[in-house]
Image (tube, helix red, strand yellow):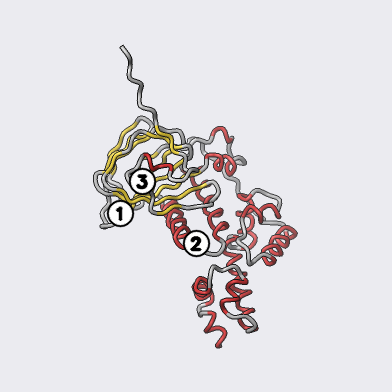
Amino acid sequence: MRRLSAPKTIVLDHRQVNTASSLLPQPSILASSGWSDIHLELYQQPKFATAEHQHTMHVIAYGLADSSGTCSSGERWLDGKHSREQRSTGDIAVIPAGISHRCSWNTSAQFMILAIEPALLKQVGQDWINPDQIELIPYFMTRQDTLIQGIFSTLKEEVESGGIGGHLLVDSLKIALVIHLLRKYCTTQAKLSSYTGGLSQTKLTLVREYINDHLHQDLKLVDLAAIAQMSPYHFLRLFKQSIGVTPHQYILQRRIETAKSLLKKGELSIADVAATLGFCDQSHFTRYFKRIVGVTPKQLRQA
């Protein structure tokens, strides 16, 4: 008698477009594009249940209220264990790569997922922990995490509206997220070093000169770190120790200071100033300018 073979586990690779289309009733309504090592998607789904599946990347699932403002409950099977979940807004689940997983929702549901390359955790954590010992702990969607909530919110806003320094902002957030995961969600506790002293004056000068010469470009953390001849993860910490703000914040400040000077000279229109400094358009420039300076570019020029 012929035996029926067990159903094959679905493998989801979030490096591929619409990888979850075979698993979920509806496609994502929002998705990131062009980010390195991480991928964000927002879903609005009817009542549903998934088949068993696993991810090639680590995944954090983030619960949201649906379009009517209602949070949905359901069940989840994670690494051979089962739990009923109430799923309040902001609850997260951690689904490590390669772990068997399925879930169900009792009503319509809205949620986000953030997929993270396992190699990124090894790259960031290699100075504090044996990369081969980095293993995330699975968690059901029953916990709140303020830092992860903030990262989800900022990344979602970046996908929706973008803005100047987008790559630098995403790079900074993913490093912060990975360090947080290594500290709080890893089977082996990472011993994070305490860096003091900041960048040397020579390296700081080189980085500042590069930033000033490329204010019109979408600067990337990896390029700035290469100038300082160190990993992006160390550079981010040492730069903030030296300057007091992150590279993303510093670059925005420099662009606004340069904009003030150009506006006072009066040789360029407001739209041209915005384009010269790499802002998407005049309204985007005006929004950031007023947030930092307290007045609009037009008001500054008139004064």
Which numbered disc covers residue 301?
none
Q: Which residue is mark 1?
A: 65
- Whether residue 87 is situated above or below residue 260 in the rendered picture: above
Helix or strand or loop: what does disc 3 sit on? strand
Q: Nearer the viewer, mark 1 or mark 3?
A: 1
Q: Nearer the viewer, mark 2 or mark 3?
A: 2
**Closest to the observer, 31 or 223:** 31
- The CA distance from mark 1 to mark 3 is 16 Å
Pointer 2 local density, CA inside 10 Å: few below 14, some 14–19, many at least 20: some
Q: Position of residue 298 (x, y in %)?
A: 53, 83
- The CA distance from mark 2 to mark 3 is 29 Å
Q: Residue at x 48, y 59 (%)?
A: 158
Q: Position of residue 108 (x, y in %)?
A: 27, 49
- Whether residue 227 is situated above or below residue 134 in the rendered picture: below
Q: Which residue is mark 2?
A: 162
Q: Position of residue 4 (x, y in %)?
A: 33, 19
In the rendered image, the residue lying farthest to the right is 202
Q: Is residue 276 left or right of residue 6?
A: right
Q: Nearer the viewer, mark 1 or mark 2?
A: 2
Q: What amino acid type should be assigned to the residue bearing mark 3? A: Arg
Mark 1 and mark 2 lie on one chain; the one further toward the N terminus is 1
Mark 1 and mark 3 lie on one chain; the one further toward the N terminus is 1
Could you tell me which quadrant the C terminus lies in? Answer: bottom right
Q: Position of residue 186 (x, y in %)?
A: 48, 38
Pointer 3 local density, CA inside 10 Å: few below 14, some 14–19, many at least 20: few
Q: What amino acid type should be assigned to the residue bearing mark 1? A: Ala
Which numbered disc covers residue 143?
3
